[in-house]
Image (cartoon, rainbow, N blue to C red):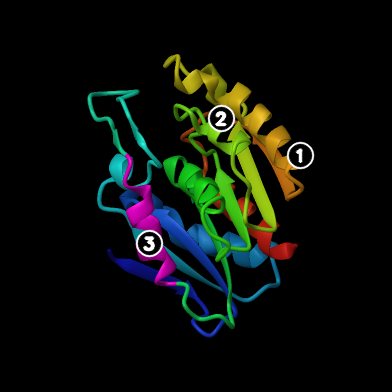
């Protein structure tokens, strides 16, 4: 698992983000935007994921697009990420885009090591995920969700459920007593992932 670090290594606020090659191609702009949107000093640790569908999915599920299904290895990935959060003097937040956003949201229902989750355009259409949220309790202080206003217009019928799912999810999270927000951005799922993720992390660390 390769780790790329951005920002101040001595900062007491640490942002953890699972990434792929596309995320890395825009991560420096994301880091710049977080710095512009917040006065909080931070270190961002970008964790390169080996297999996106397998390593970030909380349980196994059939393919939704293409032929590759979901392997359900999120628990193993979370175990590796928790090893990056061993300094008890620091504040840790987890976040990500798309399936990494879903992973971040799932992670704060697993462990109290993170103060918050930044779930930008998360794949909350994932089978069974809303029901999972309803039957578990978050272990963090804050959760940020966002979605593009054209994402629920996707041609794929499963992914088109994302709007209904995220509206239901935010109500579930509100009822669980966690500070939370749902922000709607313009565009489809592939528009401005760096900007959306920067907004998510900034909201968290600004309190």
Numbered range of the magenta stretch: 72-84
Q: Position of residue 141 (x, y in %)?
A: 69, 58
Circle 2 residues within 10 Å: few <14, some 14–19, many ≥20: few
Name the image quarter holding residue 163. Answer: top right
- For the question of whether residue 25 can be seen, the reply is no
**Where is mark 2, residue-wise?**
131
**Where is mark 1, residue-wise?**
175
Q: Which mark is residue 197?
A: none
Q: Tags 1 and 3 in contact by the CB under 8 Å rule?
A: no
Circle 1 residues within 10 Å: few <14, some 14–19, many ≥20: few
Between 10 and 57, the one nearer to me in the picture: 57
Most common secondary structure along the magenta stretch: helix
Q: Tell me the residue at 64%/57% (across/down).
A: 140
Q: Marks 1/3: CA distance?
A: 28 Å
Circle 3 residues within 10 Å: few <14, some 14–19, many ≥20: few
Q: Tags 3 and 2 in contact by the CB under 8 Å rule?
A: no
- For the question of whether residue 22 can be seen, the reply is yes
Q: Position of residue 127 (x, y in %)?
A: 44, 27
Name the image quarter holding residue 120. Answer: top right
Between 186 and 57, the one nearer to me in the picture: 57
**Where is mark 3, residue-wise?**
79
Q: Position of residue 142 (x, y in %)?
A: 69, 54
Q: Tags 1 and 2 in contact by the CB under 8 Å rule?
A: no
């Amino acid at each position: 698992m390769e780790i790329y670090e951005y920002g101040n290594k001595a900062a007491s606020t640490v942002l953890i983000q699972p990434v792929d090659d596309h995320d890395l191609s825009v991560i420096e702009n994301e880091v710049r935007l977080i710095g512009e949107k917040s006065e909080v000093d931070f270190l961002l640790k970008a964790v390169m994921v080996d297999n996106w569908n397998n390593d970030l999915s909380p349980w196994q599920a059939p393919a939704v697009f293409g032929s590759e299904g979901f392997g359900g290895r999120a628990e193993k990935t979370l175990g590796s990420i928790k090893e990056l959060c061993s300094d008890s003097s620091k504040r840790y937040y987890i976040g990500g885009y798309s399936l990494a956003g879903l992973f971040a949201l799932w992670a704060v229902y697993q462990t109290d090591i993170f103060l918050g989750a930044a779930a930008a355009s998360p794949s909350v259409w994932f089978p069974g995920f809303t029901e999972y949220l309803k039957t578990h309790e978050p272990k963090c202080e804050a959760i940020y969700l966002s979605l593009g206003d054209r994402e629920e217009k996707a041609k794929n019928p499963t992914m088109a459920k994302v709007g209904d799912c995220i509206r239901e999810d935010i109500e579930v999270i509100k009822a669980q007593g966690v500070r939370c927000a749902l922000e709607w951005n313009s565009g489809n799922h592939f528009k401005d992932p760096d900007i959306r993720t920067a907004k998510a992390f900034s909201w968290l660390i600004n309190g």
